[in-house]
Amino acid sequence: MSTPILPGTLDLLILKAVSLRHQHGYGVLLRIQQISGEAFAIEQGTLYPALYRLDHQGLMAGEWGVSENNRRAKFYSLTTLGKKRLKSETEEWGRVVAAMSSALGTAKA
Amino acid sequence: MGRGRFEREMAAEMESHIGERAADLERSGMAPGEALRLARREFGGVMRHQEDARESVWLNWVDRLGMDVRLTGRGLLKSPLYAGVAVLTLALGMGANAILFSVVDGVVFGGFSVSGCLLARGGRMAPTCERWTCQATIPAQVRLAENDFRHFQGKGT
């Protein structure tokens, strides 16, 4: 059962997906599905506003190239700033998750 | 990046994405026409996503502008003397401009009562003379001025 993705988490997933290897939009989507264990339902087109936002914030860089299917596509990779942001956001996420689990766990008990 | 280029690249990217997805579906055995249709459906409304993308880029630009403005504001607050001189210079410039304009406006467009009445009496009227500040003490003079004005406006006597 897929859950709708929380706003804000998509950006982080995109950064993570692109960090492994530069990828085009569709490839980023596939990789997100892969690394998240298909847990999220992502409408494919919603990827692009997020991609452009991250690009314009200087966290990613896009370059036109050719895909495996011989189709022209824009490939995205992380910039230095993007790598730093991914690291700090991942740590922050870990903190939030720990705090929430603790709070909710205590509430249950 | 220019607006035109952004639009073209965005459209190309989204089409390319749909094509890639269709190719994957075909590889898993689906018919090409069906694959493309499903790929489009999965992608969602292209127009809507393009609108969202345009909006997110615009919002990003506004955010950056806001940050720059705040940064500038803070910088100015830190050096009040510089800020003061800048404000004074602008104020002097704008004030001088305003005074000059109102003087020229009064002289050329008959804002002064005397010249306005004289124009009417002579039968000639400055076409832009909309404000009759003519406060002549002789009523006849005033009536003449008003008639001229109304005639010019095509309202008759």
Image (spheres, rainbow, N blue to C red):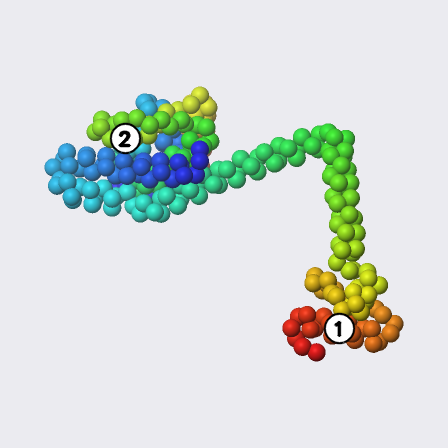
Question: Dot 1: what SS?
Answer: helix
- Relative image position of residue A64 (x, y in whole percent): 33, 27
Numbered label tally: 2
Query: Would you place residue A56 above or below residue B31 in this image?
Result: above
Choose top left, top right, bottom left or bottom right for residue B93.
Answer: top right
- Decide if residue B80 is in sight here: no
Q: Is residue A77 left or right of residue B83?
A: left
Circle 2 chain: A
Which of A53 and A100 lies nearest the eye of the viewer? A53
Quarter of the image that includes the N terminus of chain B: top left
Q: Is residue A53 left or right of residue B38?
A: right
The Cα–Cα distance between marks 1 and 2, rounded to whole angstroms, is 75 Å
Circle 2: residue type:
Arg
Q: Residue at x 80, y 69 (%)?
A: B121
Q: Residue at x 74, y 65 (%)?
A: B125
Which of B67 and B6 lies nearest the eye of the viewer? B6
Residue at the extreme right of the image, as rendered: B137
Marks 1, 2 in one chain: no
- Relative image position of residue A12 (x, y in whole percent): 39, 31
Residue at the extreme bottom of the image, as rendered: B157
Which of B109 and B44 lies nearest the eye of the viewer? B109
Q: Is residue B157 left or right of residue B118?
A: left
Q: Say few, some or many: other residues with alpha carbon within 10 Å of mark 2 (under 14 / 14 to 19 / 20 or more).
A: some
Q: Residue at x 61, y 36 (%)?
A: B69
Q: Say which mark, if any, is on residue B146.
A: 1
Tag 2 residue = A72
Question: Dot 2: what SS?
Answer: strand
Choose top left, top right, bottom left or bottom right for residue A70.
Answer: top left
Query: Would you place residue A29 above or below residue B46 in this image?
Result: above
Residue at the extreme top of the image, as rendered: A80
